[in-house]
């Protein structure tokens, strides 16, 4: 690994105490990550992360193979805001997103807003374009809820790219729904539409259409 950057300190009050306010990363490279950016440490204890560069390796954050396993009780995390822009965003050992753009705002262990979009490398060498996708979470205009939408131009490729399901080929995937934050369990209710796809081996409904898989797509 190698890199360089600067940092800034701030005095929050009249006393002698200082705290780290930000780290500016001129260039950081390790493994499959090559970025520049900034890390900001907010007064409320939250963190802001902005990264941009040729490639970012985020494979460890995108595997959903274990989504159905019971999870330990989560500890409350500090607020987090993330902005990423990368020519290549690695989501697995061999899977990646091209021209990835991600903006995330998290608080109280929940994604308050998300805008994640990009394109997936088309496995067809004769294809003229790469299938695109977009995932969005936003506060609903009324009530204590969040609107969720997902659109993928190649359903099978999208599910493989994010480690959800390997045995689907082609198709179009759309998801629209609402997360009810008034309920302590934050249930998701909505509609998933997949059409013009082909299943090669495993039963589609058994693996894909479980609540754990659907909510795992968005790590809600």
Image (cartoon, rainbow, N blue to C red):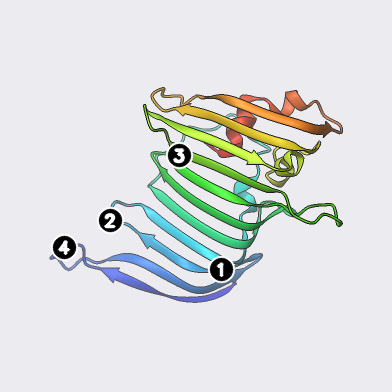
The reply to whether the C-beta atoms of the residues labelled 2 and 1 are less than 8 Å apart is no
Above-or-below relation of 65 to 39: above
Ranked by sequence position, the earlier of labels 3 and 2 is 2
Image quadrant in which you'd find residue 87: bottom right
For the N terminus, the quadrant is: bottom right
Callout 1 touching callout 4 (CB < 8 Å): no
Viewer-side residue, 133 vs 97: 133
Crowdedness near tag 2: few (<14), some (14–19) or many (≥20) residues, C-alpha within 10 Å: few
x%, y% of residue 2? 57, 75
Q: Disc number at residue 138?
A: 3
| Between marks 1 and 4 in the image, the one whose residue lies nearer the viewer | 1
Residue denoted by label 4 = 13
**Residue drawn at point x = 37 percent, y = 28 percent:** 144
Earlier in the chain: of badge 4 and badge 2, it is 4
Q: CA distance from mark 2 to mark 1?
A: 25 Å
Query: Is residue 7 visible in this depiction of the protein?
Result: yes
Q: Residue at x 42, y 71 (%)?
A: 24
Looking at marks 2 and 1 on the same chain, the residue that comes earlier in the sequence is marked by: 1
- Element carrying mark 2: loop
The residues tagged by marks 1 and 3 sit, at their Cα atoms, a distance apart of 28 Å
Q: Which residue is mark 1?
A: 35
Using a 10 Å C-alpha cutoff, classify the residue at mark 4 as few (fewer than 14 neighbours), some (14 to 19) or many (20 or more): few
**Which residue is disc 2 drawn over?**
43
| Image-based side of 164 in relation to 24, left or right | right
Q: Position of residue 31 (x, y in %)?
A: 65, 66
Cα distance in 3D space between marks 3 and 2: 25 Å
Q: Is residue 59 above or below residue 142?
A: below
Of circles 2 and 1, the one toward us is: 1
State which tag comes first along the sequence, 1 or 3: 1
Crowdedness of circle 3 by 10 Å Cα count: few (<14), some, many (20+)? some
């Amino acid at each position: 690994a190698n890199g360089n950057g600067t940092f800034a300190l701030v005095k929050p009050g009249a006393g002698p105490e200082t705290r780290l306010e930000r780290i500016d990363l001129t260039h950081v490279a390790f493994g499959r990550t090559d970025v520049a950016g900034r890390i900001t440490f907010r007064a409320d204890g939250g963190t802001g992360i902005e990264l941009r560069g040729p490639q970012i390796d985020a494979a460890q954050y995108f595997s959903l193979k274990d989504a159905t396993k019971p999870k330990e009780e989560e500890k409350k995390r500090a607020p987090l805001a993330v902005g990423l822009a990368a020519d290549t965003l690695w989501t697995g050992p061999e899977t990646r997103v091209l021209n990835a753009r991600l903006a995330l705002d998290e608080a109280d262990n929940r994604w308050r807003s998300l805008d994640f979009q990009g394109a997936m490398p088309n496995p067809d060498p004769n294809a003229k374009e790469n299938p695109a996708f977009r995932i969005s979470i936003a506060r609903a205009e009324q009530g204590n809820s969040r609107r969720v939408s997902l659109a993928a131009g190649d359903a099978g490729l999208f599910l493989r790219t994010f480690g959800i399901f390997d045995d689907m080929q082609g198709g179009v995937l759309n998801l629209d729904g609402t997360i009810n934050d008034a309920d302590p369990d934050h249930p998701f209710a909505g509609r998933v539409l997949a059409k013009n796809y082909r299943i090669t081996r495993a039963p589609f409904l058994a693996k894909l259409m479980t609540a754990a898989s659907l909510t795992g797509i968005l790590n809600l």
